[in-house]
Amino acid sequence: QVQLVESGGGLVQPGESLRLSCVVSGSISGLYSMGWYRRAPGKQRELVAGISRSGSTKYVASVKGRFTISIDRTKNTLYLQMNTLKPEDTAVYYCNGDPPFLSTPWGQGTQVTVSS
């Protein structure tokens, strides 16, 4: 079973940065497009950043220019560099395939809180 383990979240002030990591078991990250998702309180989970097998990236409009998704396939680790964080970025962040892996449970996510 593929496992997804997110880390790197925390409490930061607006304008600060965080780098999230997602360790994916096995080598699945080398075969599939991957993404970062987030669920803010009272909202549906949304895909905020994705990276394809070819390395192309996509971002939801609200994070363009601030977030950067990358992957180290040798380490089976997905990253999300989050700069110039805003209060509206507050959410639990999850990694998964894009689209989400079939038959793979979501990880516990990592909480990002942006507050002054």
Image: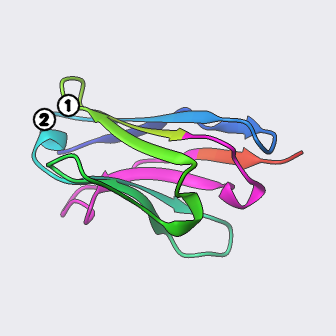
Q: Which mark is residue 1?
A: none
Q: Is residue 78 above or below residue 95?
A: above
Decide which of tag 2 and tag 1 comes sooner along the chain.
2
Q: Is residue 91 above or below residue 85?
A: below
Element marked by disc 1: loop
* Residue density around tag 1, few if under 14, some if 14–19, many if 20 or more, within 10 Å: some
Question: In this rendering, would 63 be left or right of 52?
Answer: right
Question: In this rendering, would 105 be left or right of 29?
Answer: right
Q: Which stretch did the figure color magenta?
A: 82-110
Name the residue that disc number 1 marks: 73
User: Are discs 2 and 1 less than 8 Å apart at CB?
Assistant: yes
Residue sitting farthest toward the top = 74
Name the residue that disc number 2 marks: 27
Q: Position of residue 32 (x, y in %)?
A: 15, 51
The residue shown at (61%, 34%) is 18
Does residue 102 show up magenta in the picture?
yes
What amino acid is found at the position of numbered circle 2 in the picture?
Ser
The residue shown at (62%, 46%) is 111
Instruction: Point out the image quarter for the C terminus.
Output: top right
Instruction: Point out the image quarter for the N terminus.
Output: top left
Does residue 31 show up magenta in the picture?
no
